[in-house]
Image (tube, rainbow, N blue to C red):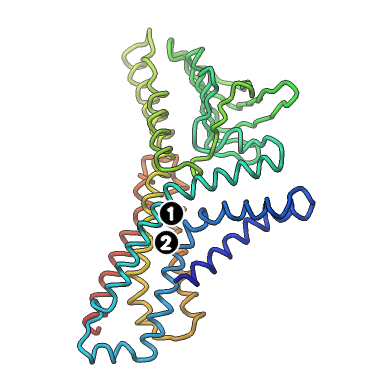
Amino acid sequence: MLLTVAVFTFVLLLGNVLKEILPLLINGQVRFAVVAEAVGLLVPFVWVFALPMGMLTATLLIFGRFSADNELTAVRASGISLLSLISPILLLSLALCAVSALVNMEIGPRCRTAYTRLFFRLTAGFSAAQLLPEGRFVQDLRHENLVCVGKNRNGELEDITVYLVKDNRMLQAPRGKIEIDQTNRVINLYLFETKGVSLNEGIVHSGDITVQIDLNQRRQDSRRLSDMTFMELRQELRNVERWLDFPLARNLTREQLRAYKEQMEKQKRGVISPIRVHIHRQVAFSFACFGFTLVGIPLGIRVHRRETNIGIAIALLLVAVYYCFVLVGAALDTRPEYAPHLIVWLPNFIFQAIGGVLLWKANRGA
């Protein structure tokens, strides 16, 4: 298990190092000590994925060899059941779940945040992704503007929501872009095909609008949701719920008031949903080791192969299936009607149910 975790850690680190850190080292922008610091900060972050992958691969390799060498037959002939044999491994997987929870919910996000700050300090510049991260509100120090974007592709924005607190207006735009004016220290946020409503008078308007945010008044904590710890995500959820608790519009008819309430409630669910998905994903990831172990033991016995490459291939296939559910939940994080925060739990339930049935059959010799 230690060997497989080390291998997957190296492979996952390699992608980040080659993409972001190595070019800076080759260009002479950083020293080797800084590179070593950056790699060290990335290690806990990749453990989020390396721990369950390593546990699954080790289980498949051990029990595949165990079955191929007929050791399972010898153990059963000695009067030892399969459940008695695997009890220490199941306890080990539960212990790894606790370690994974600590890494996923606390250590990993903090190290990733430290790495991101180090990287931006080395590159010495602002980026659109840093100023307006996807899926969370960015608030200025004067509480005059709240901005949330669904997608941010190098300054090209999608699904933008802006609350102009001072004017008591809400703006929504399907697309937009961001430009950074370093000279005047402002962010120019261009919104296209904007639809807005005044929270006082209910006046609906549309068109292209430009919103300016003072960089000197921007809050510095503009991390992505994936870089926040569990407790920070909980606090972010409470803050967003408080910020979106606007007073009811005045001078509206009963029908307009009902439509306004429905619109605000729908918007509130859409904004809160990504935060909720990240909270559930952190917790769900922590139980991956147990589900992988329950599936890996009977599959290793059934495959009945001692070759290492077979075990690794099966492990990668199972990991791909598991993370497909997670990716689906992440892709639907702005669609609360599909309950994406529950989708990220599905692979745990499926793997544990299938693993339990296969273990029961394997214990009976089926």
Q: Which label is found at residue 87?
A: none
Apparent side of residue 153 relative to residue 164 in the rendered image (left or right): right
Q: Is residue 55 above or below residue 274?
A: below
Tell me the quarter of the picture where residue 95 sits: bottom left
Residue under label 1: 326
Q: Is residue 362 above or below residue 70?
A: above
Assess disc 1: are there few (<14), some (14-19) or many (≥20) residues with their C-alpha within 10 Å of its C-alpha: many
Quadrant in the picture for the N terminus: bottom left
Q: Nearer the viewer, residue 336 or 63?
A: 63
Determine contact: label 1, label 2, CB under 8 Å: yes
Q: Is residue 210 visible?
A: no
Task: Give the residue type at disc 1.
Answer: Val
**Local secondary structure at mark 1:** helix
Apparent side of residue 15 relative to residue 249 in the rendered image (left or right): right
Task: Give the residue type at disc 2.
Answer: Tyr
Residue at the limit of the structure toward the front, as seen here: 33
Q: Residue at x 61, y 41 (%)?
A: 117
Q: Is residue 321 above or below residue 221?
A: below
Quadrant in the picture for the C terminus: bottom left
Assess disc 2: are there few (<14), some (14-19) or many (≥20) residues with their C-alpha within 10 Å of its C-alpha: many
Q: Residue at x 42, y 23 (%)?
A: 243
Residue under label 2: 322
Q: What is the x, y in percent for residue 7?
A: 54, 69
Q: Residue at x 41, y 49 (%)?
A: 282
